[in-house]
Image (spheres, coloured by chain):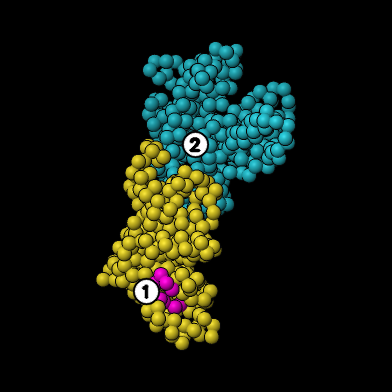
Amino acid sequence: MRALEVSGLQKAFGGLHVTREVNLSVDPGERRLIIGPNGAGKTTLFNLITGELRPDAGSICLFGQEIVRVPSRRRAHLGLARTYQIITLFQNETLLHNVMLSLLGLSGLRWNPFRRFARQAGLIEAGRAALSRVGLLDMADRPLSDTSYGERRRVEIAMGLAQNPKVLLLDEPFAGLSLEERRDVQGLLASIPRDVTIVMIEHDMDVALEFAERITVLHFGEVMVEGSRAEVVAHPKTREIYLGE
Amino acid sequence: MALALLASLPAWIGNSYYVNIASQVLLYAVFALGLNVIVGYAGLVSLGHAGLFGIAAYSGAILINGGYGHFLGIVGALAVTLGASALFAVLALRGTGLGFVMITVALGQIVWGVAYRWISLTNGDNGVSIASRPAPFGLSLVDADPFYWATLVVFLVALAAIAVFVASPFGASLRGARDQPRRMNALGYNVWLIRFLAFLFSGLWSGVAGLLFLYYNQFVSPQTVALTASAEVLLMVISGGTATLLGPIAGALLVVVMKNVASAYIERWNFVLGAIFVAIVIFMPEGLVPGSLRLWRWGVRRWRQRLAGPVAMAAVPPGSGGGQ
């Protein structure tokens, strides 16, 4: 069974066909990289998979379960988590609060109006564990607005990992990072166990190629090339589209 | 300390006129606290809450005059208010931002229209009076002092309930849905339902305040549900400080005191109130309570620096510290 199986996916905004006939199969535990020039429809594909956008046609299966009609919020409960290209965190809250909100989203406790959120030992412990995985435990009680851009990227990933997803979608996790921060995030991604399937969009070819086993090249909303690292890099179409030769 | 001061207020404030004003402050504080749940913590500005406040007052008055007694009158009025809140929420939550504001204005105006024109039900412009205040546990609330204490008890219950609500996991979900609705959805939260439930909670306390208003005046008229009444309570919340517990209370104090006390000395008291709001917006855009805290911290820092030595440090001038 595939971890993620997308078939015949289509999405148009007016006359602009952002996604046309995308097919994608990702095995459990796989590391998949999606590359493509600007406007290729990469983030739109993520938005379709997570349900933030409704496709015009096609199907999306998560571990064999059809989810194309499942509301976005329910997909999180089915084991699908994502990070955002543009950081969307809770600015005025602490790092720990951010991660705890991520944990709370999957907990029945989120409807409880009586208990103290800040005293939920289970959430605090799991939140601190998630922050420790991304190396930010010592900053847990600082407000997010006090952190650097690179640290926020890691908080994004911590929030994704905290939900213990089966499939994690990473939208440009290296965007805007310094060389040193890139290495930190790279090490962090490498440390994620294989029971999490990862699909990643990335522009930075150097770090991304090293990370992924299989690569999908998207161009004008269609899958142009798909294969192993060597196959895709050697493929003439990749060179034509992506490397601009 | 504050509690002792509040409880002994009738003893030190002098005469019953001021005790009544204190009751008004408390009942409007309950209203503003309720509105703040949706305006401050959910980030949805409602200009129709006087409609909910008025629905509670009107349905309470109609039930009591219909011979159902105070207990059933109160329970029935709150049930009607919750139903109306649910209807308001279903309609208004189709939008956020300006759309939400406009729908709540429209809903509030519908309530006003019903109060004004459905004469067989609401007695139109003449309003509805009730004959008596209730006497819970055999204690008569006819006089100013016992009514004040009863209002104080309701106010403290409201404050405690809202404080617990805001600090709860649901409160955290609500603030999250205000700040990053799309993210919250992707994290597994039902943003619409969170807002809907918060609206009900807000409507419930508006209804409680509406009943206090009914018993305070023993009278309710279309003026109670007018758009200006919605705007007034919204100004209490905004001037005091949205998404704070004490802000709406400070706002209610400011508006009620200006309305009653200042109007005795200055004919154009509305003008003074307007000037105060303008001053708050310019100097404390985040509201009186957070703004005063900021000024206080700034003052303490300046004072410490002065003690530390004559070296002039570049201190942040008041008014320039960013919003939140």
Report helix, strand or loop for mark 2: helix
Circle 2 marks a residue in which chain?
A: B
Chain of the residue on which disc 1 is drawn: A
Q: Which residue is mark 2?
A: B34
Residue depth check, mark 2 versus mark 1: number of the one nearer the observer = 1
**Residue visible at 40% across and 40% down?**
A117
The residue at the far left in this view is A1
Give the amino acid at mark 2.
Gly
Which residue is the site of mark 1? A213
Disc 2 crowd rating (10 Å Cα; few below 14, some 14-19, many 20+) is many
Which chain can be seen in cyan? B
Q: Is residue B239 magenta?
A: no
Percent position (x, y) of residue B279? 70, 37
Mark 2 and mark 1, same subunit?
Answer: no
Chain represented in yellow: A
- The region drawn magenta spans A209-218
